[in-house]
Amino acid sequence: MSFSVVKKDLKVYIRHRKTLMLIFIAPVLIMVLIGSVFSGASEGGVRDVKLGVGGGSEQGKKIIEELKSSKMFIIIDENTTDPAVIEEGVRKGRYSAGIFIPEDETQSLKLFLDNSRVQIAPVILTAFVSTTEKMSYELTFGFISKLWKNLKQMEEELKPLKEGVVMINRSIVGLNSDTKKALSSMDEIDVESLNGSISRMKNSLGQMRTDLLQSAEDINATRQELRDLDGNVSSIQNDTAELRDDLKLVVDNIDAADASMQDVQTQLHLTYNLTCSFDPSIQQCVSMALAIRQLRDTRALMLERTGRIRALHNNLVTISQKSAELHEKLEKTDIKLQKMQESISNYTSELSNINENITSMESAVISLKNVKNQSAVVSSNMEKLAAEMINSSSALTSDIDRTGLFIGEVIARSPAVIAAPIKLDREPVFKGRSYLDFLMPGIISIVLMFISFLLASITIVQERSKKTLIRTLLTPLSLGMFLFEKTAALIIISFLQGIILIVVAFVFYGILIPTDQLASLFLVILVYAAAFIGIGMALATLAESENTAMLLTLVLSIPMLFLSGVFFPFETMPELMILLGNALPITMGIRALETVLIYQKGFEAFSIYLVPLLAYGLAGMGTAYILLRKEIVD
Amino acid sequence: MMEQIIEVKSLSKSYGDFTALFDVSLDIEKGTIFGLLGPNGAGKSTLIRVLSCQSRPTSGHAFIAGLDVVSQKKDVLSIIGVVPQENSFYDDLTVNENLTYFGSLYRVPGHEIKERSRNILSMLKLDEKTNNRGGTLSGGMKTRLNIACALVHKPRVLILDEPSVGLDPVSRQALWDTIREVNREGTTILITTHYMQEADALCDRILIMNRGKIVVEGKPGELKEAAGEKVLQITSSPGNYGIIKSSLEHIQAIRSCSIGETGLKITLGEELPVHEIFDVFESNGEKINSVESSSPSLEDVFIHAAGEAWH
């Protein structure tokens, strides 16, 4: 086998600029275009959607702020209170969606969606649903958190409340027994004897009062006598003072004379000492000594005589002091008597008061009788109340216990659980993979489908129209071998495209296909390309010209694109279309590539797609073989 | 005795009710140029298709170099070269590459292809265009390349199906030269044409077919001699040839009479009843403008053999 057709075809593809473009530039362009378009959607999602806003409330403002922060919307504020304005705005295409926020927060928000924009309408709706859900959650969470706090406080307050109830209960029991005691005590009171005692008290008081008044008068008389006595004492005191002063003067004079005599004595003594120290025997000295002695004696005599005067003086001083003391005592006695008078007056008024009180007591004793009767009624009521109270308080404490338990149970749950009872944690299983990673199977399938399909049909149509097919078959080369070699050439092209796509994926988008998956990837590419090459060849034998072939491939490939699940998910298709879509070779190729590139499963997993793909390829080539044979050989 | 390279025995081919070939037998000698003539629908192309293994005969046999075209198809295809009527090579490949490709299909070793290509291109005066792409060649060159592609494996028989259709006279002359050159190399050539002149100029032997049957076969000179006829070509005015034709057919010496583009063509036997013919023209009010006399052409041979005009 010389693979002449393979070599020739590859040479022709390379020579033919348009084909070359189709083979090598188209995959790059398609990949870059689709990749860029979808990466935009994956990175920022839908952006700059015009959103009309009307109405308004505090909550509404928060929602708008939330939406603004997502960069998905350009907010156009309509400043209107009429939802119809917003609806009209959407209807006229001024914006893709409009939201009307009623002032009354209990009313629902109104979202007007431009559902003619089929691709973005669900995205807008989802954005709104998640925003309102998020805000609802936040509001509910806040509210419940606050409620929880209050409940916790309440729970804490329940314990003292219970204790209070128990205490009240106890108090009531005590009160009941006290009431009973009071009642029995009341029974002990003899009202009649009380009355007798009171009247006796009244009489005694009257006597006391009379006695007190008499005492007051006696004191008055005593006071007058004392005042007279005090007058006498005062005059004695004055007289004594005068005499004392006179004696003082006499004593002072004597003392002065004594002092003069002492001076003389002192002078004489000095003179004597000066003159008579050497010879005291001289006359003068003897006279001087005599004079000194006389002086001394005189002074002693005088001192003796004046001693009595001095004693008298001193006695007078004592009498004066004693008189003053007596005067003071008399004054004090008078004051005491005065106070006694005042006390008696007070006692008298006090006795009047007591008298009044006793009168009150008389009426109180009468009331006491009534009270006794009423107390009996109160006591029986009190007993009933106590019994009831015991029952209800035990019910109340058990209620409090239950409430406490319930609150405990309730607040043990997190407010978050109540605000969002069912929480959903999104956990993407393919971590570190970009959106484009997931698009790779689709992109590779689309590119390979178009190129394999077109090239296969074009190459056969060209061979037919240029009559080179017939000429080739006028050589020993068989038709089967010819088709096989054609297929081989196209598979080589597909492999090259696969390599280009992998390189572009890496260079433009940084997607690196694991080396251990490369063998599987190329096996899938081989079988997938073979399937479309087979179908393309069959189409080419049916087509009369290149144009017809192109049209046929387009007519087939475009519906296949839409039914492949790349642009529209199977989940949105009617059942018949799903069946059809699943049976298409492009879908099988995408599934096989997904198994290899995304799920990274082994041969068994993707071989289930390879078998029908191979069948497609063989069926296509078989059809081409039969039709061409019929055309060439008759 | 010369070796027969092609032998056809009682060959018939039918498509449903339509019989394209009916009991055709012929032998072609090795090294000759054999012309297959006939009007459209005569069965030439069907015969060529059978001989080039594209069509299975309904009955009869055909052998090329002793090989059965049905049971030994692959062997037959490797010793014949078929030049289709339309140029069929790859415009995007160079002259050399085209030859290499077709050579490799015949499993000719690479070095042989190279050598053979050089010789062929030199012979066909394409040696200066070896690296030019097929699509860029002139019309004549394309025709020569078309032939060259069928020669690269050194076929024993070269079959050309109406090769001069659409060619200008100069190109046609060049084509003839090429065919003669190839033939000189020892290749037997089977050529179909409906140009009598081409067959006359090129072929050693010709076979004229009509309606699936062989009308006559032989060397061009022999056939014309056998026909032995003289032809008068008369133009007149106003030229009501229909009336004149019916009057002339009564004259015994006149074998046939046909209305052509250049007047009335009258085929005669040995006798030449010129006066009688002129009288007919005169009696019908026709004024004779010109009279040409010639020896029989292959067309005349055909008319003579088939008993009807070439159409």
Image: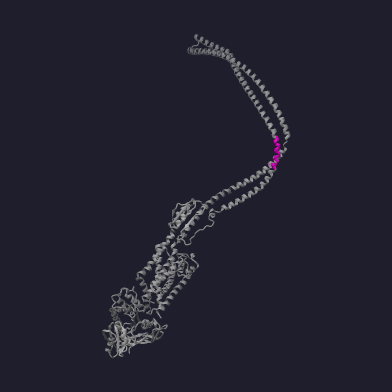
Residue B260 in picture, x, y percent from top left: 31, 83
Which residue is outermost to the top?
A283
Image position, residue B62 (x, y; %):
38, 85
Viewer-proximal residue among A275 and B2: B2
Residue A366 magenta:
yes
Residue drawn at point x = 35 percent, y = 72 percent? A12
The residue range painted magenta reads: A365-379
Relative to residue A349, is residue B249 drawn left or right?
A: left
Q: Is residue A386 above or below residue A616?
A: above
**In the figure, B52 relative to A582: above or below?**
below
Q: Quadrant of residue B305?
A: bottom left
Q: Quadrant of the C terminus of chain A?
A: bottom left
Pinpoint residue B201: horizontal percent, then vertical percent: 29, 84
From the viewer's perspective, is residue B309 above or below residue A415? below
Residue at screen point 69% across, 31% down? A359
Residue A129 x %, y % = 49, 57
* Viewer-side residue, A275 vs B36: B36
Foreground pick, B21 / A484:
B21
Secondary structure mainly formed by the magenta segment: helix
Q: Is residue B301 visible?
A: no
Q: Is residue A123 left or right of residue B88?
A: right
**What color scheme is it?**
one colour
